[in-house]
Amino acid sequence: MGDLHAGSLAARRVIAGASGFLVTAVAVVTLGFLASGEQRGLPLWFHAMAWWSAALTVVLALAAPLLNERVLRAGAGAAVASYLAVVALFPVAAEAGQVDRMPWLLTASSAGVAAALVAAGPGLGWVTVALAAVAGVVYRLRFGGFDLDGVVNDAHALLTAAVICALGGFVLSSGRGLDAAAAARREAGERESAERGRLAARTRTAALVHDEVLATLSLAASAVAVPLDRLAAQARRAALMVTRLSHEESEDSWPLEAALAREARRHDALFAARVEGPVQVSDPVREAIVGACRQALGNAVRHAEDASRTVTLTVHDATIEVVVADEGAGFEVSDIAADRLGIRHSIVGRMARVNGGSAEVQSGHGKGTRVVLRYRPDPGPEMDAAAEGRPRGRALVLLAAGFVALQVLCAVAAALAAPESWARQAVLLAVVLLATPLMWSVRWATPSWPRAAAITAVVVGGTVGAVWTAPFSYGPLWPVVALAFFLVVLALRGRTGTAMGGALLIAVVIAARGVLDGAPVGQTVQLAARPTVIVVVAVAMLLVVARMRRRIAALHREAVIAAENESWSRAARVELSRRTDELVQTVVPLMERIGAARPASEQQRREYAAWEGRLRDELRAGGLSREPLRSAVGAARGRGVDVVLLDDSGEVVDEQVLVAVLAWMTAAVGEARRDVVGRLHPPHRAMQASIAVDGRVSLFDGALTVPPPVPR
C-alpha cells in the first residue's frame, strides 16, 4: 500500500549523499596540502582516525539508497561521533606530534554537520556547527593559525556549515511535510471513500429497484390487462437479479475499457475507444462510469428499441469521456421530470458523486439521444503543499545577519594584517554589503532574469576586482567566498542555472590568476574549491530535493489511492449486502408471487401499489432512508401522517452529520399529526437540512437547530 514515511527517509538519503560529496571535496583538498608538504606532523593514528571518519561518511552516502531509516540514522550517528572524536582528540595528537598550526582539515565541518542532520535533525546539526566553531577558536589560540588566513577560513567554514544546516533542515522539513500531508489526506480520503462506497452501493441497488422492481410492481398493480407470462418472466428476472446482486462480480476488477466494452456487448451496442496511454482510475470512478453507462444503455434498449446503439470511450489529457448514443426517436430534455429516477439517480447523480465527474443528456424529437459522461481528475490539494518549495523563515534571517557580521570581521582582519590595504578592503566590503540588500530584496520570490543577471554580474565583477587587486592567498581573497554565497541565495530562489554559471565564472577567474602568477596547482585548487563547492552542493541538493518531492508525492498518491480503493470496496460490500438482504426479505417474496403467473386479487394490487410507492419514496429519500428515521416514518404513516423525504444533497454527506440529522428528524416525525416533509439540502446552503412538521419549519446546521414558527 506504500510507505507514508517515505518522505522523511528520502530526505535523509539526500542529505547523506551531500555529506559524502562534502567529505570527498575535503579529502581532495587535504591530499593537495599533504602532497605540497603542508599540514604534516600529526601522528599516524590521528590521520587514520580522520580517514576512517571520511571513509565511513562516504560509504554511508553510497549505501544510503539501500538502507532503511533506522539503519541510516544509526550509521550517520556513527559518522558524527567519529568526526567529533577527531576534533576532540586533536590536542592529544598535536602534543604527540610536531604541529605549529591547526590544520585546515579540522575546520571543514560541513560534512559532519550534514551527518548530524541525518542522525538527529537540525538540533544536533546546529550543535555540531557551534562545537566546530568553538573548537576552531580555541585550537588556533593554542596551536597557532590565528592570522588572516585562519580567521577568513574559519569564518567561511562556519558560514558554509550554517548554510548546510539550514538547507538540510529545509530538506527534512519538506520530507516530513510530504508525509504529514499524505497521512492527513489518507485519513480524510478513507472516510470519504467509505461514504462514497456506501453511496455507490445504494445507487446500484436503487438502479436495480428502479429498472426492474418498480416497473414490475407498477404493472402488477395496474388494472390494465398485462400478459401474465410476460409479467411473470419480468418478475422472476427481477427476483433473480436481486438475489444475485451481492454476489455479482464487481466492475472494480475489470479495466475501465474492458468493462465498458462488456456493457456494450450485453446491450447489443457497438464499442469504440480512442485512448491516449493507459486508462487509470480509482474504483469509485470506474464504478460510477460503468454504472451510468449501463443505465444509459438500458434506457436506450427500453425507449429506442431496435435503433442502433454505440458506446464511445475517449481519453485525452487525463479527461475521460464516454458517449452512449442511440438513433431512436429522442425526446425533449426540458420535459424530463425532476423526479425521473433513472436519470437523476443512476446517471446524473452517480457521476456527480465522483469528484470531477459529470453527466449530460442531449436529445430532441427525431434526433436520437446522447448521454455524455465526463470525468476529469480533481487535482485537489497537492501532497507537497504542506512543505514550501524553498527554505524560508528565521533560519534565513539569522544566516543573513551572520553573513554580514562575518564579512565585516574578515574585512577588519584583512585591514589589520596589511594596514596599507585598508582602502582596498573598505571598497571590497562595500561591494559585499551593497550587494546584500539586493539579495535580501528577492528572499521570498524568484528574481526576474534581469535581476538575476545583475546579481551575477555584481558577484563576478566583485570577484574580478578582488582577484586582480589582492595577493593570491586565501585571506586577502575573502570577498570571493563571500560573494559566492549570493549565488547560493540565487539557487535557493529558483535560479539554479544562473547560480551554476556564476560559480563557473568564479572558478575561471581564480584559475586564470593562478596560471598568470605561476601559483602552485594545489593553492589554486584550494582557493577555487570553497566558493564553487558551496554553490554546487546547494544546487545539487535543491535539484535532488525537487526530484525527491515529485517522486515521494507520486508514491504517497499511490498509497492514498490504494487506501481509498480498499475503504471504498469494503464499505460498498457491506452496504450492498445490507441493502440486498432488505430487498430479499421484502421485495423478492413479492416478485416470486408475481412470478407464479397467477391473476392478482384487488387486495394484492393495492399491496403492489403500496410497495411501489414506498420503494419510490425511499429512492427519493436517498441517505435519509436509514434507521432510526425509517421506522419513525413507518409508524407515522401508520397513524395516517403523509411523509415525504427528499435527499437533495447531491454529494457525500459527512457520516456524523447524517447521523445527527437522522436523530433530529426522527424526533420531529414522532410528533407529527398531519404531514411531514424532510429534506437534505444541496451543499451550497447554509443549513444542512430542514423539516416541516404540520406547517412548522425547523432548520439544521450541524451545531444547532433553528425552529422558527414559519407557516406553510
Image (cartoon, helix red, strand yellow):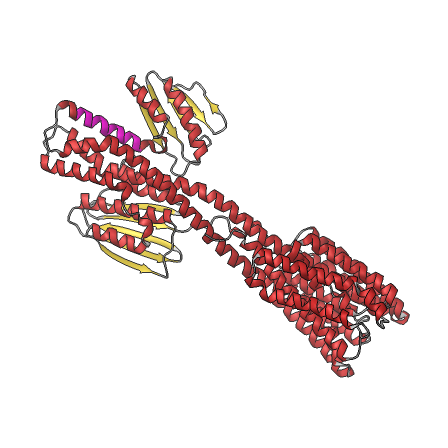
> Is 576 displayed left or right of 401 in the figure?
left
Instruction: Identify the residue at image location x=50%, y=28%.
Output: 703
> Is 643 displayed left or right of 483 in the figure?
left
Residue 202 visible in the shown view: no
x%, y% of residue 455?
A: 69, 65
289 or 333, nearer to the observer: 289
Instruction: Identify the residue at image location x=21%, y=46%.
Output: 300
Instruction: Identify the residue at image location x=16%, y=25%.
Output: 604
Residue 179 visible in the shown view: yes
Q: Looking at the image, which residue sits at the far right?
A: 419
> Is 701 displayed left or right of 453 in the figure?
left
x%, y% of residue 122?
A: 68, 54
Assess whether residue 609 is covered by the magenta stretch.
yes
Q: Residue 493 appears in which quarter of the rendering?
A: bottom right
317 or 28, nearer to the observer: 28
x%, y% of residue 307?
A: 17, 50
156 or 405, nearer to the observer: 156
Which residues, given as a range, are shown in magenta? 605-619
Q: Residue 6 appears in which quarter of the rendering?
A: bottom right
Q: What is the quadrant of the C terminus in the image?
A: top left
x%, y% of residue 511?
A: 72, 78
| 513 up-or-down from 168: above or below | below
